[in-house]
Image (cartoon, coloured by chain):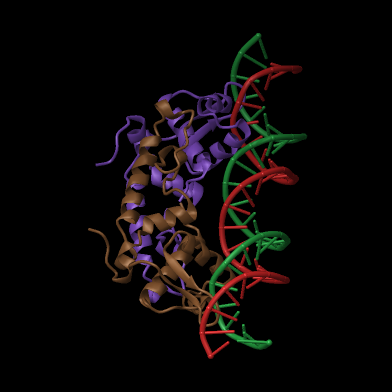
Chain colours: A purple, B brown, C red, D green
DNA sequence: CTGAATCCTTACTAAATCACTCAAGATGAT
DNA sequence: ATCATCTTGAGTGATTTAGTAAGGATTCAG
């Protein structure tokens, strides 16, 4: 039931950018503050850029900054698009459903579905702004 | 956030044994009913035996059966002991806590902790009997 | 206008994990 | 004894993870 370091690292990077909103931070800066290796971080920031959460400025004095307001960054969305579905099994996934041959009578699916729903609710109701303010949904 | 097939398979096996409580089922039987490959299932049943959930009878007409009442089989415990901690990150794990250098000020830990607590609550409040009866805690 | 700082792109890889298979041994019922 | 079964331990191919490495493209400062 682990989350990969990539997802963790992406959130760390977003948090650092959120803590310096408006400023442009170089990958090296972000690496220092997040303890994520530079060349790995490059890839992650590229992905976050493709997902629209972040924008970049090239050349000297370039770097990254948030593209949107932290309140508009949905943590569930970030995790899902970086790591894949939130559901613990394909049969319980909404975004990446995969049928299972046991499904008609499966006694486990309700359990997996409940876990998916609960995790998704927490993650999708949390925004970057919530994390920055140490505030949670509900 | 996936669960491995090993955990799923173990629960499938326990469910089949629970549906035939009192009887001894051979690995081949269980494999037929769970669609888990025989030789993989062997290993999983061995582990379940070591964990005390299941007992075996060797020799001809041998096989496996539940050791305890289904109401006493805690799903969270099975998952945790077969797959490792329920927490999404080591810093949020109670049974396998791992310190993190960012921890004192980490903005993510409260999120991971909340996910751990929620998942653990669902899994630990659910027993094999609940699954067999299509009933959930609460 | 040149060079340094930075992002961008692609390729590669070592290690771990997953999901098994296989072979041979031990045990018990008939 | 024989055969069905569990037991034990080793081995393996595929995939994923968590990076590294090398060079190219762009922008800014001087």
Is D25 situated left or right of B20 in this image?
Answer: right
Please tell me how many numbered marks the rendered image carries: 0
Q: Residue at horizontal 37%, vertical 72%? A: B18
For the C terminus of chain B, the image quarter is: bottom left
Q: Is residue B41 visible?
A: yes
Q: Residue at horizontal 43%, vertical 29%? A: B103
Depth check, front residue: B28 or B114: B28
B88 in relation to B30, above or below? above
Depth check, front residue: A70 or A82: A82
A104 in relation to A91, above or below? below
**Coordinates of residue C1 in the picture (x, y in percent):** 75, 18
**Coordinates of residue A128 in the picture (x, y in percent):** 38, 36
Choose top left, top right, bottom left or bottom right for residue B116: top left
Depth check, front residue: A1 or A58: A1
Is D6 situated left or right of B136 in this image?
Answer: right
Q: Is residue A53 visible?
A: no
B26 in relation to B124, above or below? below
Is A103 situated left or right of A38 in this image?
Answer: left
Q: Residue at horizontal 50%, vertical 67%? A: B45
**Coordinates of residue B9 in the picture (x, y in percent):** 48, 66
**Coordinates of residue A99 in the picture (x, y in percent):** 45, 70
Choose top left, top right, bottom left or bottom right for residue B109: top left
Q: Residue at horizontal 45%, vertical 49%? A: A80
């Amino acid at each position: 039931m682990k989350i990969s370091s990539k997802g963790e690292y992406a959130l760390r990077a977003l948090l650092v950018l959120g803590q310096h909103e408006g400023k442009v931070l170089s990958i090296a800066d972000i690496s220092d503050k997040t303890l994520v290796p530079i060349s790995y971080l490059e890839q992650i920031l590229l992905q976050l850029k493709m997902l629209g959460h972040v924008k970049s400025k090239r050349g000297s004095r370039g770097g990254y900054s948030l593209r949107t307001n932290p309140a508009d960054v949905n943590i569930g969305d970030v995790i899902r698009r970086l790591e894949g579905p939130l559901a613990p099994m394909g049969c319980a996934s909404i975004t990446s459903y995969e049928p299972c041959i046991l499904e008609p009578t499966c006694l486990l699916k309700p359990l997996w579905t409940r876990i998916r729903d609960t995790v998704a609710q927490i993650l999708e109701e949390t925004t970057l702004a919530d994390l920055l303010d140490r505030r949670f949904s509900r």
